[in-house]
Amino acid sequence: MTILKLQNIHYISDNTNIINGINLDINEGECISIVGPSGSGKSTLLKLCSDLISPSQGDLFFKNKNYKEYNPTELRKKISYCVQIPYLFGETVYDNLSYPFETRKEDVNKIKILEYLYKFNLDESYINKDVNSLSGGEKQRIALIRNLIYKPEILLLDEVTSALDKDNLKIVEGIIKDMNKSGTTVIWITHNIEQSKSIFNRKITIEDGIIENEEELN
């Protein structure tokens, strides 16, 4: 089943064509890597898919329903976007990890938060840490946990392991792979060639705002 469809998508910013007529079908349960040179439109493509920006031309469909027919807030709960440079708000890690519960008007599940911290090789002490004291890799993992506490139907990842060491990289890849196996569709931008082939079933190369190549992976 096609879960995400891009139909003749164009995006123009400051009179510059960033995305130039992309057509793409993403099937439910796929795990796809997006590669290509800097400035090729990869991040813009994920912003379009996450409904953070609207196409200049063309249409996006989630489960055969046009994005325009969805409440944006509800759509973004189903399609979760995690950026390369994480934005952590408030003062503490807790401020960030309680946020998904608060937006859904549910009680904060501290046990669930702790489970995710340990999954990502972080311990209980992180809950009350000042976000400004965290390393780049720690910030990336906290931002990921914030996105994953409620399992999305589509997970969009933009270079989210760029600040991680080898051991934590493998941990994060394993968590994402398990989520994909349990039903979450994953689209992941990476510059890591080895990573782009490691856990994915398809690799898409974007250059100059168009799909230059698609490769099926084992």
Image: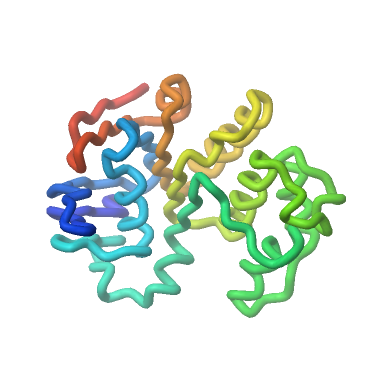
The residue that appears at 40% across and 68% down in the rendered structure is 75
User: Is 141 left, or right, of 127 in this rendering?
Assistant: left
Pick the residue in front: 148 or 178.
148
Q: Position of residue 9 (x, y in %)?
A: 17, 54
The residue that appears at 22% across and 34% down in the rendered structure is 207
Q: Position of residue 13 (x, y in %)?
A: 23, 58
The residue that appears at 77% across and 49% down in the rendered structure is 133
Question: How many labels were placed on the picture?
Answer: 0
Q: Name the quarter where the C terminus is drawn.
A: top left
Q: How is the image coloured?
A: rainbow
Q: Which residue of the protein is positioned furthest toward the right in this rendering? A: 125
Q: Which residue of the protein is positioned furthest toward the front in this rendering? A: 14
Q: Which residue of the protein is positioned furthest toward the bottom in this rendering? A: 105
Q: Position of residue 96 (x, y in %)?
A: 67, 62
The residue that appears at 42% across and 47% down in the rendered structure is 185
Q: Which quadrant of the structure image shows residue 60?
A: bottom left
Q: Position of residue 74 (x, y in %)?
A: 44, 72
User: Is 6 left, or right, of 190 in this rendering?
Assistant: left
Pick the residue in front: 140 or 79.
140
> Above or below — where is 126 with respect to 51?
above
